[in-house]
Image (spheres, rainbow, N blue to C red):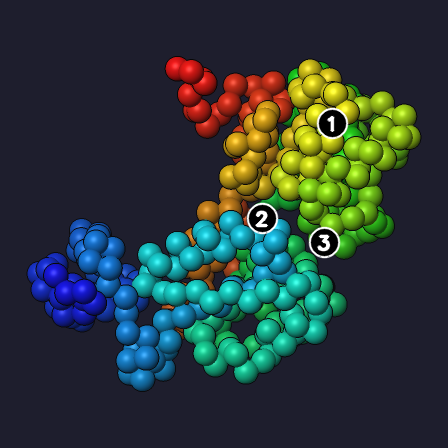
Amino acid sequence: MNVNPTIHDVARAAGVSIKTVSNVLNDNPKVGPETRLRVRRLVDEMGYRPNLSARGLRSGKTGVIGLAVPSLRETYFAELADSVIRAAAKRGLRVVIEQTNGNRDLEIATLSGGQMRFIDGLLFSPAAIGQQDVDVLATNDPLVLLGERIFGGPTDHVTMHNTSSARAAVEHLLGIGRTRIALVGAPEQPADEASSANLRERGYRQALEHAGIGVDPRLVVRGGTWLRETGVAAIRRLREGNVDFDAVFALNDTLALGVLRALAQDGLRVPDDVAVIGFDNLDEGRFSLPSLTSVDPGRDEIADTSVALLVNRIQEKDTKAAPKTVKSGFRIVERESTGFADGDGWPTPGV
């Protein structure tokens, strides 16, 4: 087997034509499922990588897509990037990542800048531009929008059930008998803006109101970035203000990990004294002590769906089709921080 296998090597090993291998790599639906699986398996086993320069000269395509996210320091976006890379690799594509730092000018430049000529299409998760900027999405380049900042735009859009999944998280806490539920990571100023923070706060309020429990504003901790230190600071504020609480809903897992740290430092037992649930189902939550109950918003589904939509636009299968909006499914992953046996099946220490 060659050190650097060619498409000829893959075709010969699979017993198919070079054209068939090319069709598989380009996700052409005309290839049968058995042939597709055989070629994909051999591509992985042989370590074949398409010659992007040659592909570009022949087809005008580079075989590279872009992913623009606010910050890779936010673990959700790092894990989303990993999911996108794996979803793209299944389709013979590579991914370049742009970090916009939530900067409005950088986000606009990402959409309109010259770098678009080096990629076939872009997955774009904005943090600064919003509904008022919907016109900047009007581009001739293949584009799929991620997240909650803009709805009803001219592009395909993949998002999550922020409000209903947040409501389910709070209902989970209510279901284990908690009634003084603190919200950590709430926006500085509540608004109707379609941001993750606002949509998740809406779900928090809906759950409490439906249960006949009024929202105590002292339990809503506003402000700060969604990082561990913000979670620590939120618990400090609640404790210093002598606010009684028996549960915490953190609007992402990174905040929740800071919450767990602060509670442990103050000698509060989780979940006995305070139950904690996060959002995003990050890998890190499986290893925290206690392990973290979290909302799984369907990150892998978001990645695979968005890449599939982008590939369709790149291949011009859907050039005249109306933009699609797709929402991923979600589930509550019950773990030790709300009193459940670890759902990931870790063995008992010493066994």
- What is the number of the mark on residue 194? 3
Q: Position of residue 318 (x, y in %)?
A: 42, 68
Which part of the image, by quadrant, shows the N terminus?
bottom left
Neighbours of disc 1 within 10 Å: few (<14), some (14-19), many (20+): few
Q: CA distance from mark 1 to mark 3?
A: 35 Å
Mark 2: amino acid: Thr
| Kind of element beneath mark 3 | loop
Sequence-first tag of 2 and 3 = 2
Q: Position of residue 211 (x, y in %)?
A: 76, 24
Furthest residue in direction right, as rendered? 241
Nearer-the-camera pick, 125 or 259: 259
Nearer-the-camera pick, 237 or 218: 237
Describe residue 154's horizontal placement relative to residue 314 as left or right.
Answer: right
- What is the number of the mark on residue 75? 2
The mark lying in front, picked from 2 and 3, is 2
| Kind of element beneath mark 1 | helix
Q: Position of residue 292 (x, y in %)?
A: 59, 30
| Kind of element beneath mark 2 | helix
The residue wearing badge 1 is 265
Q: Which quarter of the picture shows residue 22?
A: bottom left
Up/down of 288 relative to 179, above or below:
below
Sequence-first tag of 1 and 3 = 3
Mark 3: amino acid: Ala
